[in-house]
């Protein structure tokens, strides 16, 4: 079903959304570029491949989508194009976070208007707010936008860790429906499960913690690896949810080299390089200050892709 708020109301796009709840293998989809511009045809092709491969949900304009170096106009267009292309077949969670509360509100309003099912809202980066500042930031977005929101905690990128107590405080708001937890700390993940309501959606923010996060009560993963092996990531989540833990574990072990390879250099450089090698996008182009993958790391990545029979 569409993402539901505490009061049981669905998001704007609920009538045409997938009947599946938000969870499973959720791709943080790359934004293909060509000659400095968004490759819209390339993005549409990637979305179609993801859906055909069984991906349960799509996140445009996340960190992997290079939202930090897109203009507002590009960001909005990518969200709109994703919603249009998906056409209700799976939920769309639009990345709308910023280190500015007013900018976050503006982008979240747009995602709601565009027909996304929810927003993924990162903790403000660089300015390092206190726990109270984090709480007030998310409450301001909830109050102004009245739209289902997945919090995004990734201290390795932002310089601030949102503590489980703060997450639980935010979770009392009907519009705060879940969190992407990317600390890699299973104690913190477990504390979030303990402290938050039972219907709160916990998503792993790292592929390598997806399987163990499911074991402590997670609903899925917002995945980088799903860009490259969407079918296998979806199969792992499906197996776990069906109670076939042995199959899910085998897939976790099989995919682990890819999980590591996706971070041989800064995300999404390896993902885009892999997709270009696989012929899924025309170019591995990223925007400065990101740079093309070094020759040595590209060779390491190719070894992993060959081992998985992807090239």
Image: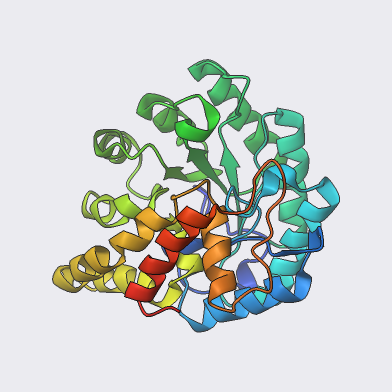
User: What is the quadrant of residue 107 in the picture?
Assistant: top right
Q: Is residue 253 visible?
A: yes
Left or right: 112 in relation to 204 = right
State the image coordinates of residue 47 (x, y, percent, origin top left). 61, 74
Foreground: 294 or 34?
294
Residue furthest front in the image? 296
What residue is rendered at 48% in x and 69% in y? 228
Foreground: 110 or 53?
53
State the image coordinates of residue 117 (x, y, percent, origin top left). 61, 60
Residue furthest right in the image? 73
State the image coordinates of residue 306 (x, y, percent, origin top left). 38, 75
What residue is rendered at 55% in x and 70% in y? 275
What residue is rendered at 81% in x and 58% in y? 36
State the image coordinates of residue 164 (x, y, percent, origin top left). 36, 29
Left or right: 208 in relation to 176 = left
What residue is rendered at 68% in x and 68% in y? 283
Q: Is residue 218 visible?
A: no
């Amino acid at each position: 079903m569409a993402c539901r708020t505490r009061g049981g109301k669905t998001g704007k796009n609920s009538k045409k959304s997938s009947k599946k709840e938000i969870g499973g293998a959720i791709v943080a989809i790359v934004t293909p570029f060509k000659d400095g511009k968004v490759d819209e045809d390339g993005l549409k092709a990637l979305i179609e491949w993801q859906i055909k491969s069984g991906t349960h949900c799509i996140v445009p304009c996340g960190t992997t989508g290079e939202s930090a170096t897109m203009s507002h106009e590009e960001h909005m267009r990518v969200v709109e194009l994703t919603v249009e292309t998906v056409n209700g077949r799976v939920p769309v969670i639009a990345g709308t976070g910023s280190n500015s509360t007013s900018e976050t509100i503006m982008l979240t309003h747009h995602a709601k208007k565009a027909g996304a099912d929810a927003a993924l809202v990162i903790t403000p980066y660089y300015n390092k707010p206190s726990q109270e500042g984090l709480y007030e930031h998310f409450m301001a977005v909830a109050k102004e936008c009245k739209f289902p929101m997945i919090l995004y905690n990734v201290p390795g990128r932002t310089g601030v860790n949102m503590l489980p107590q703060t997450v639980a405080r935010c979770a009392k708001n009907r519009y705060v429906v879940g969190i992407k937890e990317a600390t890699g700390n299973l104690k913190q993940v477990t504390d979030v499960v303990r402290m938050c309501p039972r219907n709160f959606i916990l998503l792993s923010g790292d592929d390598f913690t997806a399987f163990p996060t499911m074991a402590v009560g997670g609903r899925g993963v917002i995945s980088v690896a799903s860009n490259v092996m969407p079918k296998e990531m979806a199969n792992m989540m499906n197996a776990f949810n069906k109670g076939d833990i042995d199959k899910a574990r085998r897939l976790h072990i099989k995919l682990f080299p890819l999980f590591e390879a996706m971070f041989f250099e800064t995300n999404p450089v390896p993902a885009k390089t892999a997709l270009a090698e696989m012929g899924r996008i025309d170019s591995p182009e990223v925007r400065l200050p990101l740079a093309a993958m070094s020759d040595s790391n590209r060779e390491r990545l190719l070894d992993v892709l060959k081992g998985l029979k992807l090239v």
